[in-house]
Image (cartoon, rainbow, N blue to C red):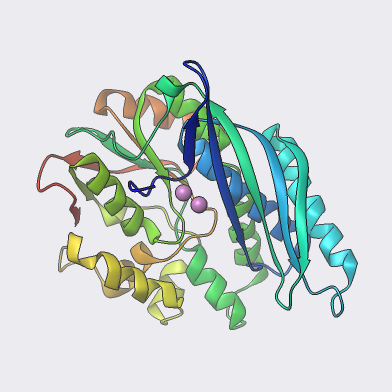
C-alpha cells in the first residue's frame, strides 16, 4: 500500500498472484444503464493497469429503496453485468444496503504471474509516456450538473468512460511495458507524479499533445471545474513545474479528476511508436505519446 499502486497484490504460489481492488461512487451520468457500465469499467481498470486478468467480481450497491424506483437499480446492475461479460469476468456475489444516496461499484479479483506484474515504479530515463483516453470527464460532469452541455458531448463523454482499458492493457504487455497506472481521481498530473515518485525519475509531458474530450477547453475557460481540481493542485503542485506559457485553463484540465480514465503506459522509446500503431489498429484511436521520462530530479513532473 505504501507505493500508492492501483490495487493490492498477494502472491499465492511461484506462478500465481491475485490482484484485488474495490471502487464505487455516485452516478456521473443520468442514464442508469450507462452508469452501471461506467462504474464496472472503472472498477476493472486497476487490475488491467497491473498487467492482470480480471476473473471475478462482487457488486457493491447503496440504494434508496424507499424513495427510488427499483427499475433504476435493475438497469444499473444490467449495465455492470454487460461490462463484466465483455471483460470475461464472472459475477459471484455482492452486497447491498439501503442508503439515502445511490452508489455502485465492484470489488474485483484478478490473477497475474508474479514476474509479469506491472507497477507504477518501473519507468526508466529515455522511456516514452502514452495516454490512451482523452481528458476532461470531471469538467464535463460539472458542466452537465449545471445544464451547460449538449447531448452529443454527453454521449461522447459517456462512451469514453464506459470503454474498458482491456485492449491497451493486452497490447502494452505484448510490447514490453515498463510501468503503468490509470488516470482517476488525482488527475493526469497527480497520477504522473505518483509514477515519478515510485520510479524515482522525472517525467516531462507536452500539454499540446494531450487529447481532450470535445468542448473541455471551452468549459474549463468558463471555470466549470470540479472541486477536485483545486485539491489536486494543492496536493501535487509542489512537485510539478509548469511552463508559464501553459494557459490557466489547460493547467486546470491537467489536474481534472477523471472517472474511468485511460491508462498511462511507460515503455522504451523504440517500442512506443509500434504500440501506438497497434492501439490505433485495435480501435484505441486517441492513444498518443504525451511525453518522456527524463532522469532527475526524482519524483518531479515538468509540463511544457
Ligand atoms: Co488506478
Ligand atoms: Co482505483
Q: Can residue 179 be seen in this view?
A: yes
**Image quarter of residue 257:** bottom left
| Residue lying at 41% horizontally and 43% vertically, measured from the top left | 181
**With 157 as the anchor, is 245 left or right in this view?**
left
Q: Residue at x 34, y 68 (%)?
A: 232
Q: In this view, does 200 lie to the left or right of 187?
A: left
User: Where residue 78 appears, x then y in whole percent?
Assistant: 82, 51
Evaluate whether residue 280 shows in this view: no
- How many dots with numbers? 0
Which residue corresponds to the image point at 39% horizontal and 47% vertical from the top-left?
1
Where is residue 71? Give x, y as percent.
Answer: 89, 65
Residue 142, image x, y percentages: 53, 76
Quarter containing the C terminus: bottom left
Q: Nearer the viewer, residue 303 or 194?
A: 194
Nearest the eye: 230 or 64: 64
Is 6 situated above or below 112?
Answer: below
Q: Which residue is at the front of the view, 90 or 179?
A: 90
Using the image, determine if residue 77 lies above or below residue 81: below
Looking at this rendering, what residue extends furthest in the left direction? 296
Residue at the farthest top position:
15
Judge from the rendering whether residue 29 lies leftward or rightward of residue 19; answer left or right. Answer: right
* Residue 192: image location, x then y, percent: 31, 51
> What residue appears at the point 77 percent right and 66 percent down from the top-left corner?
97
Residue 90 relative to residue 141: left or right:
right
Vertical relation: 204 (above or below) 10? below
Amino acid at each position: 500500500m505504501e507505493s500508492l499502486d492501483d490495487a493490492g497484490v498477494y502472491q499465492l504460489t511461484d506462478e500465481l498472484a491475485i490482484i484485488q481492488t474495490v471502487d464505487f461512487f455516485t452516478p456521473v451520468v443520468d442514464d442508469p444503464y450507462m452508469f452501471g457500465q461506467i462504474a464496472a469499467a472503472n472498477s476493472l481498470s486497476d487490475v488491467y493497469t497491473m498487467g492482470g486478468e480480471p476473473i471475478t467480481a462482487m457488486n457493491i450497491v447503496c440504494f434508496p429503496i424507499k424513495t427510488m424506483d427499483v427499475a433504476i437499480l435493475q438497469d444499473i446492475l444490467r449495465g455492470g453485468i454487460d461490462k463484466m461479460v465483455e471483460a470475461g469476468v464472472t459475477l459471484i456475489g455482492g452486497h447491498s444496503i439501503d442508503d439515502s444516496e445511490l452508489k455502485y461499484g465492484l470489488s474485483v479479483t484478478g490473477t497475474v504471474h508474479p514476474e509479469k506484474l506491472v507497477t507504477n515504479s518501473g519507468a526508466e530515463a529515455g522511456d516514452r509516456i502514452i495516454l490512451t483516453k482523452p481528458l476532461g470527464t470531471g469538467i464535463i460532469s460539472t458542466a452537465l450538473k449545471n445544464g451547460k452541455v449538449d447531448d452529443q458531448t454527453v454521449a461522447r463523454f459517456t462512451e469514453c468512460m464506459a470503454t474498458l482499458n482491456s485492449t491497451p492493457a493486452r497490447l502494452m504487455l505484448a510490447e514490453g511495458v515498463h510501468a503503468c497506472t490509470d488516470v482517476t481521481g488525482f488527475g493526469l498530473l497527480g497520477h504522473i507524479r505518483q509514477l515519478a515518485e515510485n520510479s524515482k525519475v522525472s517525467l516531462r509531458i507536452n500539454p499540446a499533445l494531450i487529447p481532450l474530450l470535445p468542448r473541455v477547453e471551452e468549459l474549463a475557460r468558463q471555470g466549470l471545474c470540479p472541486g477536485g481540481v483545486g485539491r489536486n493542485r494543492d496536493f501535487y503542485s509542489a512537485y510539478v513545474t509548469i511552463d508559464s506559457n501553459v494557459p490557466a485553463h489547460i493547467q486546470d484540465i491537467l489536474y481534472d479528476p477523471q472517472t474511468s480514465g485511460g491508462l498511462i503506459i511507460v515503455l522504451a522509446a523504440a517500442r512506443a511508436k509500434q504500440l501506438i500503431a497497434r492501439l490505433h489498429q485495435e480501435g484505441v484511436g486517441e492513444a498518443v505519446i504525451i511525453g518522456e521520462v527524463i532522469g532527475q530530479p526524482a519524483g518531479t513532473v515538468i509540463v511544457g
